[in-house]
Image (cartoon, helix red, strand yellow):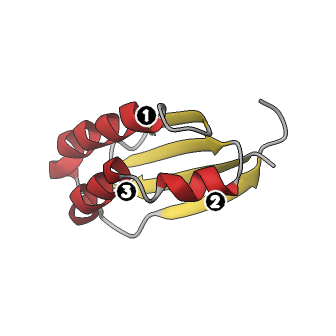
């Protein structure tokens, strides 16, 4: 079954531009992964420090493989010090795509 994950990330104000740069690079690689259906990177218009990543994969294995890629690991190491608080994830079964 296809799955999607919404990842919510809060960034300290002085690191927003660096976070965006790292996340765009991660997005550009992620959309090329086998099994990736969609990978969106969004910023909350009411709170510029809040971001959401919407990740859709054909199955759990493809989603798990994403976390093993070099680009994900680089992104994770880069952005973790920028976070104002721990990120939150919500996983869903993707019913239409």
Along the viewing direction, whichever of 89 and 11 lies nearer the viewer: 89
Provide the secondary structure element on which disc 1 rests: loop
Total numbered circles: 3
Residue 24 vs 9, above or below: the answer is above
Which residue is disc 1 drawn over? 45
Along the viewing direction, whichever of 56 and 16 lies nearer the viewer: 56
x, y percentage for residue 77? 25, 62
Figure quadrant of residue 78:
bottom left
Figure quadrant of residue 26:
top left
Locate the C terminus and report the quarter of the image it occupies. Answer: top right
Spatial CA distance of label 3 from label 2 is 15 Å
Provide the secondary structure element on which disc 2 rests: strand
Residue 10 is marked as 3
> Which residue is depicted at the point 29% across and 62% down?
83
Q: Mark 3 or mark 2: which comes first in sequence? A: 3
Spatial CA distance of label 2 from label 1 is 21 Å
Q: Mark 2 or mark 1: which comes first in sequence? A: 1
For disc 1, the neighbor class at 10 Å (few under 14, some 14 to 19, many from 20) is: few
Asked whether the viewer can see residue 11, the reply is no
Residue 89 vs 48, above or below: the answer is below
Which residue is disc 2 drawn over? 90
x, y percentage for residue 7? 52, 54
> Which residue is depicted at the point 20% across and 39% down?
17
For disc 3, the neighbor class at 10 Å (few under 14, some 14 to 19, many from 20) is: many
Figure quadrant of residue 58:
top right
- Left-right relation of 4 to 84: right
Which label sits in the foreground, 1 or 3?
3
């Amino acid at each position: 079954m296809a799955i999607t994950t919404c990842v919510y990330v809060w960034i300290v104000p002085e690191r927003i531009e660096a976070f965006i740069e790292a996340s765009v690079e991660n997005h550009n690689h992620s959309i090329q992964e086998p099994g990736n259906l969609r990978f969106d990177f969004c910023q909350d218009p009411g709170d510029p420090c809040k971001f959401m990543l919407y990740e859709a994969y054909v199955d759990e294995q493809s989603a798990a493989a994403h976390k093993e890629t070099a680009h994900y690991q680089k992104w994770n190491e880069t952005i973790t010090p920028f976070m104002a608080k721990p990120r939150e994830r919500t996983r869903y079964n993707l019913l239409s795509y």
